[in-house]
Amino acid sequence: MAQPASLPGPVALLLFLGLFRCIESKGPFNLEVPPQIMDPSIEKCPMNCRCDVAPIVGRDCGVTAECADWLVFPEANEYPEGIDCLIVVSPMLGALNETVKERGYQNIPSTVKRLELNQCQLSELPNRAFEHLRELRILKLEYNRFTTIPADAFYGLRFLKVLSLAGNGLEPGAPSYDVMETYKNKIEELHDSQFHTLENLQVLNLMHNQIQEITPRIFVDQKKLRVLKLAGNPGKNKLKQTHIAFKDLLASNALVQLDLEEDAGDELENYFYDTNTSLSDDYGGPGPLPRPAWAEKLAAERDAKKKRKQAEKESKEKKNKKQDL
């Protein structure tokens, strides 16, 4: 395990304390990460990480590092060789200047297929921040402080299957709600080419931001998008399925879940997890993607829920009319 060299007293003390304490969860990402190597075949592991070849997060991960309370990003040579999945919860990273953070992103090994930088107080991304991560299939940047994202921040991630930039989805009054309000993305604008080159994207989560409008051609490259989540955005005009940006998506028969008002769940990601295909190249063949059985079940449940709500509404209206008489 890499050790800090020639650090000033206060910084060394902080690193020492951070190295040997477990993480007290103050949000939805509960990582208790004593620094340790869980498998003898792994020769190195970054500070404040748990490294394993039988990871807790992501069944189809190979070598995984689950990390918390970083003061700085590790150097490239501190990561385990052949790392597949990197899961990080570290609010202190937000205090780093943009040059240091950009170097930190670049130090992430190109072998990584799943990257989660959640609850890290990140507020800016450089252009083409993750372009070197050509193997990336899952990218989650939830509970940060993004208000804008460069148009080409995700350029070149052609194998990406899941992208999440969700804000604070906790309900007021829920445990940790007040704390997480300070750790939420508030993205206000999406560029027309925001998702350009993400041709294999299947899940896009943009819930609980401050997105006001979407452009007509923003999803032009997303021929295989199955799940699109936009609920919880205020919008100048309420987003509807009739918006021109959704026209080709809905016509393609690939999109099976479009959340504009409420979250309909994570069935597709659960499916990936249950079938160990999160990191695979399971993108389907040419043409429209087949509508799987789980999607039919989800649609049936959604229809049943709508019917129940309509029945309850009609019953209430009848009751009110009787009272008025």
Image (cartoon, rainbow, N blue to C red):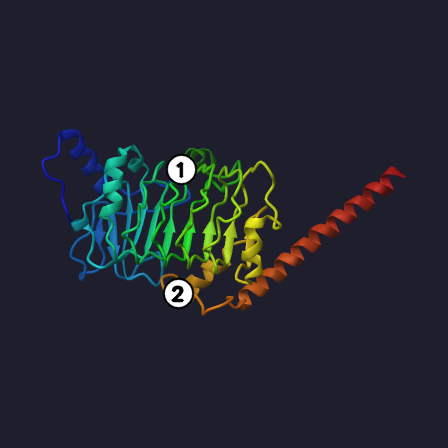
Label 1 neighbour load within 10 Å: few <14, some 14-19, many 20+: many
- Tell which of 225 and 55 is nearer to you: 225
Above or below 7: residue 284:
below
Q: Position of residue 170 (x, y in %)?
A: 50, 41
Kind of residue at badge 1? Phe
Which residue appears farthest toward the bottom when viewing the image? 285
Q: Which residue bears the numbered disc 2?
A: 277
Q: Which residue bears the numbered disc 1?
A: 146
Inter-mark Cα distance, 1 to 2:
29 Å
Q: Secondary structure at mark 1?
A: loop
Label 2 neighbour load within 10 Å: few <14, some 14-19, many 20+: some
Q: Position of residue 197 (x, y in %)?
A: 39, 54
Q: Position of residue 88 (x, y in %)?
A: 31, 46
Q: Identify the residue at image location x=58%, y=54%.
A: 247
Kind of residue at badge 2? Thr
Q: Position of 58 compared to 21: left or right?
A: right
Where is residue 202, by image quadrant? bottom left
Q: Earlier in the sequence, mark 1 or mark 2?
A: 1
- Tell which of 2 and 184 is nearer to you: 184
Q: Identify the residue at image location x=23%, y=42%.
A: 103
Q: Secondary structure at mark 2?
A: loop
Q: Position of 325 compared to 305: left or right?
A: right
**Can residue 71 be seen by looking at this rendering?**
no
Which residue appears farthest toward the left when viewing the image? 6
